[in-house]
Amino acid sequence: MLKRLLGDSVALVFGNLETVFKICGTWFVLQFLAFGILFLLIANSSAAFFLAFIPVLAITLAASASIAVAWHRFGLLHEYPTTFHLKLGALEGRLILKSLILTLMMVGCVFFVGVVQALTGSSVVAGLVGILIALFGVPVFLRFSLILPATAVDHPISIGEAYSISRGLGWRMFVAIFILSLPFALISEALAYLLKLSEGGLPVILIQLKVVILNVLSQIILMVLSISVLTSGFRIAMEREATKAQA
């Protein structure tokens, strides 16, 4: 299954790069402009910054949901996006809600580690508890996350159902995401190193611009690859359920 998760994700993304940039491009431009305005406001007024932070956060949530829904629907239903994709409707709203539920679960785990540290007074004990939660919690969390592609394709399932149909997929999805992330982490480090070497040279602004563009492109591809792992995981789970129903 790991081989299939990796193969399906890579093929889906790199075989459809035009679709990747159609789905992500307009949202990333909008986010770039929003963050640019936010940074300008930081320099002028902290009050203005806090007023602008909420709309920027809303744009970020909307972009994540819209991209995820469009990509899941493309991968599972072969639904192609428009050239300038900025769709935001009921499906995206439901996906935001499900994402927030999953986020609250993660926050709850972090809060529990904080409580352990407060009660024991030991960062070592709290660290060990955190490691145990991560080891056992990450695959469970990824199994729960199959509610996201299910929501995107109008096949809503509960968190319990997502966990039930994804037996054996949790760790495999985690390993797939880790393996796919490694090259991009190395690329990011290499770009940072090249930028450092360029300090003092004449075309520093041009080099910085190229680094920013490459970083944005790598972030887009990495994000869509991670979404694709969930897409593939959901497809595998549905195929297994269909096979059970036929047996």
Image: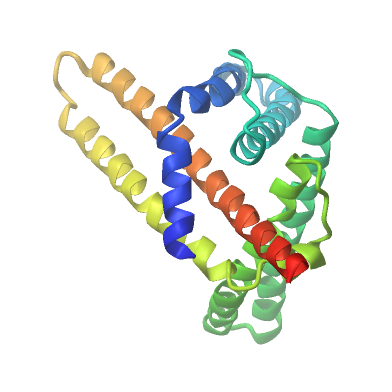
Residue 162, placed above or below residue 54: below
Residue at 83 percent across and 40 percent down: it is 94
In this view of the protein, which residue sits in the foreground, 201 or 33?
33
Residue 166, placed above or below residue 196: below
Residue 228 point in image, percent of width and height: 54, 45
In this view of the protein, which residue sits in the foreground, 59 or 238?
238
Is residue 178 visible from the viewing direction of this image? yes
Q: Quadrant of residue 69?
A: top right
In this view of the protein, which residue sits in the foreground, 13 or 118?
13
Q: Quadrant of residue 136?
A: bottom right
Residue 176 point in image, percent of width and height: 45, 58
Residue at 60 percent across and 52 percent down: it is 230
Residue at 59 percent across and 24 percent down: it is 42
Residue 214 point in image, percent of width and height: 34, 27
Say which quadrant the C terminus sits in.
bottom right
Residue 71, placed above or below residue 29: below
Left/right of residue 57 with respect to residue 180 in the rendered view: right
